[in-house]
Image: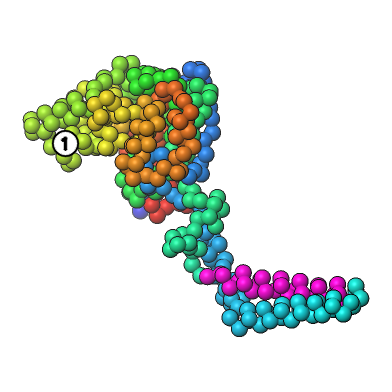
Amino acid sequence: MITFFKYLTTKISNCCACGLIQIASVIRIRNALAFATHSFFQQEGFVYVHTPIITTSDCEGAGEMFQVTTLINLMEKVERDLIKNPPPSEADIEAAKLIVKERGEAVAQLKAAKASKQEITASVAELTAAKESLAGLLERSKLKPGLAKKDGKIDYSQDFFGRQAFLTVSGQLQAETYACGLSDVYTFGPTFRAENSHTSRHLAEFWMVEPEIAFADLEDDMNCAEAYVKFMCKWLLEKCYDDLEVMARNFDKGCIDRLKLVASTPFERLTYTDAIKLLEEAVAQGKEFENSVEWGIDLASEHERYLTEVKFQKPLIVYNYPKGIKAFYMRLNDDGKTVAAMDVLVPKVGELVGGSQREERIDVIIKRIEEMGLPLEPYEWYLDLRRYGTAKHSGFGLGFERMLLFATGIDNIRDVIPFPRYPGRADL
């Protein structure tokens, strides 16, 4: 019995030690990828800019945003105050008005009687105090439980920023303003999605790398994304080989070979339309997908991984997607059905990078915003970039945690970020 207890204790200790080693390796790999990111863009002449975490516009147009507001705090404060100090009644207000009237008449009588300056000053002071008391009662009478409303809608003019505000889903729109002034820029920071998803691929808070390239079309964008992904793979192979071996032993035996493949292999490129044809051919040959395949769908992870892991067995860039499944800011192609968008797909993860050439024609982008049912007002500043002249430009976003999944072979995205946030969980 004692021998078994010692054996069990030793196994538990070894498991804990192994877990700590794995966590340490993941964090070192994360650190190396962050260093590689800055190294690549700095070497390429990009300027690092900090875009806001709090914003008033929805970059993706999906509406899955965390709202930033002080209205709830204000409402709770008002409700607590009303319990301790109830609002004045109509009788209280009428009595206060009567006092003001009486004080006013007293001042008038003293002036008519040519009373002393001292008497008049004292009477005026009493009138002023009565008016202030009435103003306070009137102000308190306006206090109501619940959120402040105007015309039946929440009155955001009473909010901290004087309008609706959210945690950003992307720094892209703001980065574009700097690209127009500084040429090539990039931002690297936290982004947020209020998507009630419990899958192994989604987080409520995650990090994005978002370069914006001036005077660049879609091909330039694809070239930059490919070079960046290859650079990171080579960096890990050179700087973090010991930690990669830990990942290979414990999670994914093929993670090192996968990094070598991506680092050394030219990425395949094909249009979305051709990608759908290949998927339809696979279905015709007996391949089963959980998600249906037809032109116009947003490619699912299983579709993306089939193309990269089975069909081409290497990284793939799919471009020219249907406009109906992409954001309003992506440049409309001449066919009127597709936009100049591209996704970089890699084995293990599927989509790693999403980008596009930006729409520079103001009339076209306004129409796209309206088609998506978005209000124009929050985007007026963004439209000004086109209204007063612009240059063609492109950019993309790389999900930093997805790059970590690709590099380490770990299956759950929650295990590659120090403090994961997801529905129902925001500890520490």
Residue 158 colored in magenta in the image: no
The colour style of the image is rainbow
Quarter-of-image position of residue 378: top left
Q: Which residue is mark 1?
A: 293
Residue 250 pos. (x, y %): 34, 34
82 left or right of 13 in image: right
Viewer-side residue, 149 vs 197? 149
Q: Which residues lie in the magenta part? A: 119-144
The dominant secondary structure in magenta is helix
The extreme left residue here reads 285
Residue at the image point whose x is 71% and y is 71% from the top:
132
Q: Relative to 196, say whether 191 is above or below.
A: above
Viewer-side residue, 134 vs 409? 134
357 left or right of 155 in image: left
Q: Amino acid at mark 1?
A: Val
Q: Could you tell me if residue 249 is visible in this image?
A: no
Q: Could you tell me if residue 372 is visible in this image?
A: yes
Residue at the image point whose x is 40% and y is 20% from the top:
216
Residue 132 colored in magenta in the image: yes
164 left or right of 272 in image: right
Q: Relative to 71, say whether 27 is above or below.
A: above
Residue at the image point whose x is 59% and y is 76% from the top:
87
Q: Relative to 297, say whether 73 is above or below.
A: below
Q: How many numbered marks have been drawn onto this rendered protein structure? A: 1
Residue 194 pos. (x, y %): 39, 48
Residue 190 pos. (x, y %): 47, 39
Residue 95 pos. (x, y %): 66, 82
